[in-house]
Amino acid sequence: MNAIIGEKLGMTQIFDEANRAIPVTAVKAGPVVVTQIKRPETDGYSAIQIAFKEMSTEKANRPTTGHFSKAGVVPHRHVVEVRVDDPDAYEIGQVISVADVLEVGKKADVTGITKGKGFAGVMKRHNFKGQGASHGVHKVHRAPGAIGACATPARVFKGKRMPGRMGGDQRTILNLEVIEVDADRNLLLLAGAVPGAKGSVIVVREAVKANG
């Protein structure tokens, strides 16, 4: 098992032995429950499905209720499929805590949905410098400027950096250090920032590059 689902609680800071402030993100990680096991002979690959954050049966629709009833667990709000090497090492209904996945000093990869910014201009979205603001310049200081390419090819190239919807995208931050793991309270402290707003759901995995 190399992943767990969590909820971002926010950021704070702690101090190390040298009294240096370390910015950390607090995450309520798990516990999660195994709700499905996939094997090569039946599904073509090895994986388990884990579920996070219980919900009342009244709020679950019939397909969701049936899926969780088959596993013998109450409905949950979030499910994630995780690839594993040995699916026979897990069983339906097994509860997995954050201490089973991560330990202090290791690195973690965190996947989440970034904050949605709505429709944004080029200065906010692409870090454009902006146009001059001296005398004789019209009020176009935050405008992108010319976007064309003359008579040839007489069109705007695809991928041109322009205003548009910003944020709300899935992003993964690699190699964040695990500062603290509190198994009793299901809390996890990660050095640095993670994608998403407070209360958003994230997936924390063992780092694929740093822990080898």
Image (spheres, rainbow, N blue to C red):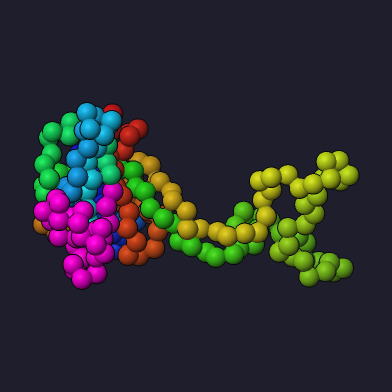
Count the labels in the image: 0
Give the percent coordinates (x, y) of residue 79. 27, 52
The part of the chain drawn in magenta is 54-80
Residue at 62 percent across and 55 percent down: it is: 127
Which of the two residues, 200 or 106, is positioned nearer the viewer here? 200
Residue at 34 percent across and 47 percent down: it is: 110
The N terminus: image quadrant: top left
195 sits to left or right of 38? right
Give the percent coordinates (x, y) of residue 163. 65, 59
Taking the magenta stretch, the answer to whether it contains residue 85 is no
Q: Quadrant of residue 182?
A: bottom left
Determine whether 9 is above or below 195 in the image.
Answer: below
Give the percent coordinates (x, y) of residue 186. 17, 56
Determine whether 40 is above or below 189 in the image.
Answer: above
Which of the two residues, 162 or 76, is positioned nearer the viewer here? 76
Residue at 17 percent across and 34 percent down: it is: 87
Residue at 35 percent across and 65 percent down: it is: 198
